[in-house]
Amino acid sequence: MKLEITLIIAAAAALINIWLAIRVGRVRTSEKVSVGDGGNEMVVRRMRAHANFVEYTPFFLILLALVELAWGSNVWLWGAAIIFILGRIAHGFGMDGIGKLRMVGTMSTLLILLGLSIYALFIAYSGTVFTGIETTTTLAG
């Protein structure tokens, strides 16, 4: 199985990670802070936006890949993945103090992780096995 959704979203996540790192570098350069945060609020905000992305994205990508592997690609999974990516972009801008984007990013991230976690548990305990083309139900004995 190719895991098309996971491959595309992992590539998008890598690009967002690069974007967030560049944003940290730019503010470090403009504020002349080479190591740590230098007590500069904007450096702290950008560093935390980047660190927050790195903290949540691995769990998301693991769940995404496992659900896609177990259940296959579907519209719901595409939607969840796109919402996660858009939420992470919103969070990055929101950490700069732009409107309510931080809250939107945080809530979308947490809700998507919760949804994928519940979906993964459902798959694990449903007794249904995805075979690539059709699903079959196993009898628990």
Image (tube, rainbow, N blue to C red):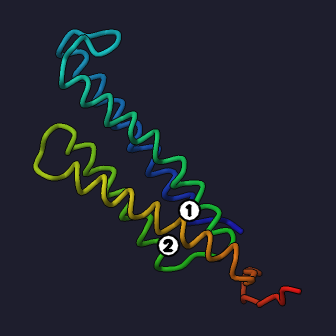
Secondary structure at badge 2 equals helix
Q: Which of the pair 115/82 is nearer the observer? A: 115
Q: Position of residue 74 (x, y in %)?
A: 53, 79
Secondary structure at badge 1 equals helix
Q: Which mark, residue 77?
A: 2
Residue ID at (39%, 57%): 110
Using the rendered view, name the quadrant where residue 2 is placed. Answer: bottom right
Q: Is residue 131 above or below residue 54?
A: below
Q: Position of residue 17 (x, y in %)?
A: 41, 39
Mark positioned earlier in the residue sequence (2 or 1): 1
Q: Is 16 on the left-hand or right-hand side of 26?
A: right
Could you classify mark 1 by the number of other residues whose Cα lies within 10 Å: few (under 14), some (14-19), or many (20 or more)?
many
Q: Position of residue 50 (x, y in %)?
A: 36, 35
Kindly identify the amino acid type of the residue bearing the numbered disc 2.
Leu
Residue situated furthest left in the rendering: 99
Could you classify mark 2 by the number of other residues whose Cα lies within 10 Å: few (under 14), some (14-19), or many (20 or more)?
some
Q: Is residue 125 above or below residue 49?
A: below
Residue ID at (29%, 50%): 89
Q: Which of the pair 87/22 is nearer the observer? A: 87
Q: Which of the pair 134/1 is nearer the observer? A: 134
Residue ID at (21%, 44%): 93
Kindly identify the amino acid type of the residue bearing the numbered disc 1.
Leu
Question: Quadrant where the N terminus lies?
Answer: bottom right
Q: Position of residue 44 (x, y in %)?
A: 26, 25
Q: Which mark, residue 64?
A: 1
Contact? badges 2 and 1 (CB < 8 Å): yes
Q: CA distance from mark 2 to mark 1?
A: 8 Å
